[in-house]
Image (cartoon, helix red, strand yellow):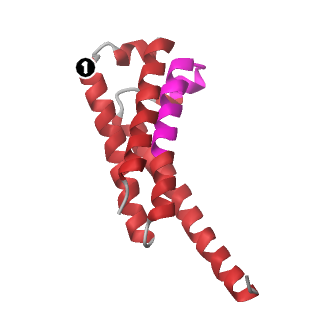
Amino acid sequence: MTEPNLLSSLAGFALYFMIAVVMIKLLLWAYEKLTPYDEGALITENNIAAAISYTGAKIGLAIPMAFACFQSVGIFDFIIWSLVAFAAQMTLFGVTVFARPLLISQIKVGHVAGALRLAGSSVAVGLLNAAAMSY
C-alpha cells in the first residue's frame, strides 16, 4: 500500500471509529433513559444483575454496529443501521418486560438469573440483527 493510500485508509478508519464510539455512547445513554430503572446508579451500588443486563445490551448493540460499520456503503448508512440495531434492542427489552413483568423488580434487587436471561437475549438479538444486515 502506498503512503497516500495508507493515509486515506487511516482517515477513513478514524472517521468510522469516532462515529461508532459516539453512536454507541449516545445509544447506550438513550437505552438507560428508556429503561425503567437507572442502570448507572444500580451498577454504582454494585448491583451485579444490573451490570449483567446492561453489558448484554451493550454487546447486543455493538455486534450489529460492528457489522454495519463493515458492511455500510457510507457514514449515513452506518448511522441508519446503528439505529435499527438500537430499535431491535429496545423492542427486545419491551417484549421481555411484557412477558416477564417481575424482571424489572428482580434486576433492581440483584436477581442474577433474570439479568442473565435478559443479557443472553440481548446478545442473541444482536447476533441475529447483524446476520440480517446483508445486501
In the image: residue 87, left or right of residue 9: left
Residue located at (71% from left, 80% from top): 6
Most foreground residue, 135 or 31 = 135
**43 in relation to 82, above or below:** above
x and y percentages locating residue 38 in the rendered image: 44, 29
Image quarter where the N terminus lies is bottom right
User: Is residue 77 within the magenta segment?
Assistant: no
Amino acid type for the residue under numbered disc 1? Ala
Looking at the rendering, the stretch of residues picked out in magenta corresponds to: 41-61
x and y percentages locating residue 116 in the rendered image: 48, 20
In the image: residue 62, left or right of residue 91: right
**17 in relation to 122, above or below:** below
The image quarter containing residue 135 is: bottom left
Residue position marked by numbered label 1 in the rendering: 99
User: Which residue is most to the left?
Assistant: 98
x and y percentages locating residue 51 in the rendered image: 55, 26
Most foreground residue, 47 or 115 = 115
Residue located at (59% from left, 74% from top): 12
Q: Is residue 110 visible?
A: no
What's the magenta bit mostly, secondary-structure-wise? helix
Residue density around tag 1, few if under 14, some if 14–19, many if 20 or more, within 10 Å: few
Most foreground residue, 39 or 118 = 118
User: Is residue 60 within the magenta segment?
Assistant: yes
The image quarter containing residue 74 is: bottom left
**129 in relation to 72, above or below:** above
x and y percentages locating residue 21 in the rendered image: 56, 56
The image quarter containing residue 10 is: bottom right
